[in-house]
Amino acid sequence: MEDTLKILVVDDDEVDRMAVRCALTKAGIQMELSEVADGNDALSILSTTAYDCVFLGYRLLDQDGLTLIKQLRSSEIKVPLVILTGQEDKQTAVQLLKTGATDYLSKSRISPENLAQVLRSAIRVYRAEIQVALAKDQLRESHEQLLRKNQELERQQQQLQMQNFKLSEASVLKSHFLATMSHELRTPMNAIIGFSQILLRPKFGQLTHQQADMVERILNNGKHLLMLVNEVLDFSKLEAGRLDLKAEIFDVLKVINLAVGEMRSLADAKNLSLLVRTDLQNSLVFNDPVRVKQILINLLSNAIKFTESGEVCVEVKELPANRVTIIVRDTGIGIAPRDFQRIFEAFRQVDQTLTRKYPGTGLGLAIIDSLVRMMGGKIFLESKLGVGSMFKIELPRQIKLPSVGGDTPPLPIDSNQVFSSAKNPHHSSSQVRQAPIGYPKFKL
C-alpha cells in the first residue's frame, strides 16, 4: 500500500495496542496511527475524524465490541472495523460480522503478515461495500426516476384517452348532425326541383324564353345542391357504418350507359368528347346497381370538371378470376404524385383555398374508395400533370354479401386498396408499370 493510511487502535490493554503497532510497523505499512483506550473516546474521535481502518478490541472496560459496533453503525459512521478477539469463538465472530464488523482476528495470531493481510482485506471489502452501496443508491434513484416517468406517462396516457374519447364523441355528434341536416335539406330541395320541372312542362303554361332560362337555372342548381347534400348524407352513413349494399343481378353496360347519358350534357357544354368502349363477353354482374352508378357518376363528374379540352373515355373490360374493370380516362389537368393519396381523404381537395377554380365538397373520391372497398374491389390511379388521369376500378363480378354492411371500416383510406402511378394514363402498354414506393405493381 503506497498511500499513507489513517489507522485507529481501540483497546484498554496497552500491551495489545503496542503489539498491533509493532506488527503494522514491521509489515511496512505507511500509516498515521492513533490509539484510544475505551469505547466512548473511540466514538468521539470517529465522529469527527475519518480513518481508513479501526482495530477494535472485543473486550473494553466501559463496554464490549458488539455494543460499540452498534453505536457506530447507528451513528452512520462508516469505517472498516477489524475486531481483535481474545479467544477462538466462531459463534462470536459470526455475531460480530452480522452486527457490522468487517473482519476479525484473534490476538494470539497477531503478526506482521496476518495483520497486514487482514488490513488489506478489510479495506478492500469496505471499498467494495461502498461501491455496492453507491450502485444501490444509483439503482434506487434510477428506479424512482422510472417510477416518476411511468406516473407521468400514465397521466399523459389518461389525458390522451380522454382526448380520444372526446374526439370520438365529437365525431359521432358530427356524423349525427350531418345526417340530420342532410335529411332536412333534401326535403325542400326535392320540392324546388319538382316545382321547377312542373313549370317547364308546356301543359302548365307557356313560359317566355327568359323565364324558361331562369327556371332551368333553378332546376340545375337545385340538382347540383341535392347532389352535394346526398354526398354528405352518404358520407355520414359510411362513417357510421350504416350504409348497406343492396345487391342484385343487373347489366353493367346499361348502368354505364345511363351514367354516361346523365353526364353527356356537362361534357357537351365544354365541347368534350364522351366515349364508351366495352370489351365484355358477359355484362351481367351481381352488385348494387345504384352504388355502381354513383361511382361512375362521381368519376365522370370529376373527369369532366378537370378537363378543359379533349375527351373523357369510359372503358369496361374482362379480367381473370371472374372480375371486371371499369376505367375512366381524361385529358385534364392531371394530379401531382404528392397528392395521390390526399385526394382520397374526406373533405380533402388539391386546392383548399376559398377562391379555388374547381368547387366541390371533397367527398366524391372518399365515397368511391369506401364503396369500392365494401364491394371487395380495388382502385388504381395513374396521372401526369398536364396530360390527364386514369381511375381504374376492379370489382368482383359477384360481391360477397356477408362481407358488406355495418362491419365495413369507416372512410379513412387503406393504402393497400389504392394503387397509384405517375405514368401517362393515356399510354397503353402490356408491361408492368413501377408504382411509387409503398404501392403494389399492376398491369394496364
Image (cartoon, rainbow, N blue to C red):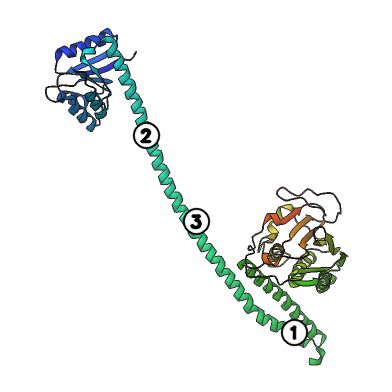
45 left or right of 116? left
Crowd around label 1: few <14 · some 14–19 · many ≥20 (10 Å): many
230 left or right of 329? left
In the structure shown, which secondary structural element does the residue marked by tag 2 occupy?
Answer: helix
Residue 70 disc label: none
Residue designated by label 1: 196
- Closer to the chain start, of discs 1 and 2, is 2
Q: How far apart are the alpha carbons under marks 1 and 3?
A: 52 Å
Kindly identify the amino acid type of the residue bearing the numbered disc 3. Answer: Leu
Residue designated by label 2: 136
Crowd around label 2: few <14 · some 14–19 · many ≥20 (10 Å): few
In the structure shown, which secondary structural element does the residue marked by tag 1 occupy?
Answer: helix
Q: Who is closer to the viewer here, 98 or 360? A: 98
Whether tag 1 and tag 3 are in contact, CB under 8 A, the answer is: no
Q: Who is closer to the viewer here, 60 or 350? A: 60
The quarter of the image holding the N terminus is top left
Kindly identify the amino acid type of the residue bearing the numbered disc 1. Answer: Ser
Q: Dividing the picture into quarters, in which one does residue 286 lie? A: bottom right
| Residue at position x 64%, y 60% in the image | 412
Q: Residue 63: percent from the left, percent from the top?
A: 14, 25
Q: Residue 369: percent from the left, percent from the top?
A: 70, 62
Kindly identify the amino acid type of the residue bearing the numbered disc 2. Answer: Lys
In the structure shown, which secondary structural element does the residue marked by tag 3 occupy?
Answer: helix
